[in-house]
Amino acid sequence: MAEKIVQTAGRDRLGDFAPDFAHFNDDILFGENWNNSDLDLKTRSVITVVALMSQGITDDSIRYHIQNAKAHGVSRKEMAAIITHTAFYSGWPHAWAVFGIAKEVYGDDTD
């Protein structure tokens, strides 16, 4: 059986302030969408990193999703290729910013 994604960040960070948003984040986005078996977790992780990079998102959310991609089997070499490829479509400055985060996440990993 595939790994089940369980998320509590919404409730942990916003549960008292925005309980509906926390529910949608934890139960729908991660609970249902991320657990849909039509895509494997590695592919889903790559798509998410590309979508965030394309929007210029360089906050904790892309760091989390790069860590998630790494945990789901995206190698350092693959991540570098993903960011490079996406740079041509989403912008070179976005790639520079995301490379800085990816380097921190992957550290000294070699592959």
Image: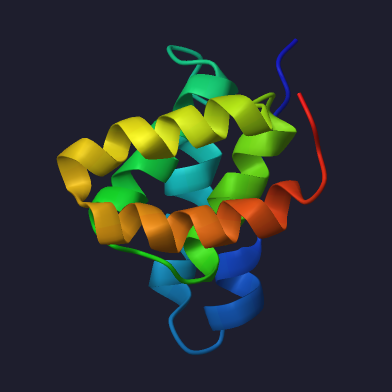
The residue drawn where x is 66% and y is 61% is: 8
Does 36 sit above or below residue 9?
A: above
Can I make out residue 102 in this image?
Answer: yes
The quadrant of the rendering that contains the C terminus is top right
Residue 74 position by quadrant: top right
Front residue of this view, candidates 38 and 79: 79
**Left or right relative to 3: residue 52:** left
Relative to 63, does residue 74 appear above or below in the rendering? above
Q: Where is residue 42 in the image (x, y as percent from the top left)?
A: 57, 23
- Residue 68 image-quadrant placement: top right
Residue at 52 percent of width and 44 percent of height: 30
Q: Where is residue 104 in the image (x, y as percent from the top left)?
A: 69, 59
Location of residue 7 in the rendering, given as x and y in whole percent from the top left corner: 64, 52
Quadrant containing the N terminus is: top right
Comparing 17 with 95, the one in front is 95
**In the current view of this chain or complex, which residue is farthest to the bottom?**
17
Residue drawn at x 30%, y 44% is: 51
Q: Which residue is drawn at 54% across and 34% down?
A: 79
Place of residue 28 in the rendered image (x, y in percent of width and height, measured from the top left): 43, 46
